[in-house]
Every structure is written in structure tokens, then in C-alpha cells.
């Protein structure tokens, strides 16, 4: 995995997490990552 690919993957995941957070439908796979980066309110749990 090249640095550019990792950077793109990170940005993509961050964007998806941001969108899912705004729509209120957090995806499980990104939800765990979000929780690692910053404590998110457990609204769907």
C-alpha cells in the first residue's frame, strides 16, 4: 500500500464517516474508527 493510497483511503473513510454522521446512519465499520479518533455520542446504540 503506497502512502498516496493510504492517504486517499483515510480521506475516503473520513468523508464517509462525516456523511454518515450527518445523515444519522453510521456504518459499523466506520463507526469503530470514528470512536477511536474521537468519542462519538452513542445515539444508535
Image (cartoon, rainbow, N blue to C red):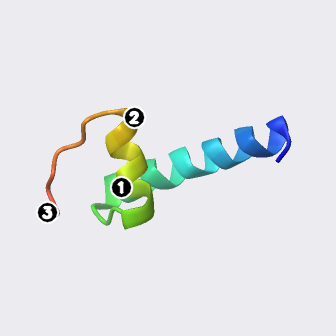
Q: Is residue 15 left or right of residue 12?
A: left
**Residue at left offset 36%, top offset 55%:** 31
Q: Is residue 36 left or right of residue 39?
A: right
Whether residue 27 is visible here, answered yes or no, is no
Q: CA distance from mark 1 to mark 2?
A: 10 Å
Q: Is residue 37 left or right of residue 15?
A: left
Q: How many marks?
A: 3
Q: Tell me the element at label 1.
A: helix
Q: Nearer the viewer, residue 25 or 35?
A: 35
Q: Position of residue 13 (x, y in %)?
A: 56, 51
Q: Position of residue 29 (x, y in %)?
A: 44, 62
| Farthest residue, direction front | 1
Q: Are marks 3 and 1 in contact (CB under 8 Å)?
A: no
Q: Are marks 1 and 2 in contact (CB under 8 Å)?
A: no
Q: Which mark is residue 17?
A: none
Name the residue that disc number 1 marks: 31
Q: Which mark is residue 45?
A: 3
Q: Nearer the viewer, residue 34 or 18?
A: 34
**Residue at left offset 38%, top offset 44%:** 34
Q: Are marks 3 and 2 in contact (CB under 8 Å)?
A: no
Q: Position of residue 28 (x, y in %)?
A: 36, 65
Q: Tell me the element at label 2.
A: helix
Location of residue 39 by image quarter: top left
Q: Is residue 4 above or below residue 42?
A: above
Q: CA distance from mark 3 to mark 2?
A: 18 Å
Counting residues from the start of the chain, the first of labels 3 and 2 encountered is 2
Q: Nearer the viewer, residue 44 or 1?
A: 1
Name the residue that disc number 2 marks: 37
Q: Residues within 10 Å of mark 1 (few under 14, many from 20)?
A: some
Location of residue 25 by image quarter: bottom left
Q: Residues within 10 Å of mark 2 (few under 14, many from 20)?
A: few
Counting residues from the start of the chain, the first of labels 1 and 2 encountered is 1
Amino acid at each position: 500500500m503506497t502512502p498516496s493510497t493510504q492517504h486517499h483511503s483515510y480521506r475516503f473513510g473520513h468523508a464517509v464517516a462525516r456523511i454518515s454522521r450527518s445523515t444519522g446512519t453510521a456504518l459499523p465499520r466506520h463507526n469503530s474508527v470514528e470512536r477511536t479518533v474521537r468519542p462519538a455520542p452513542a445515539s444508535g446504540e
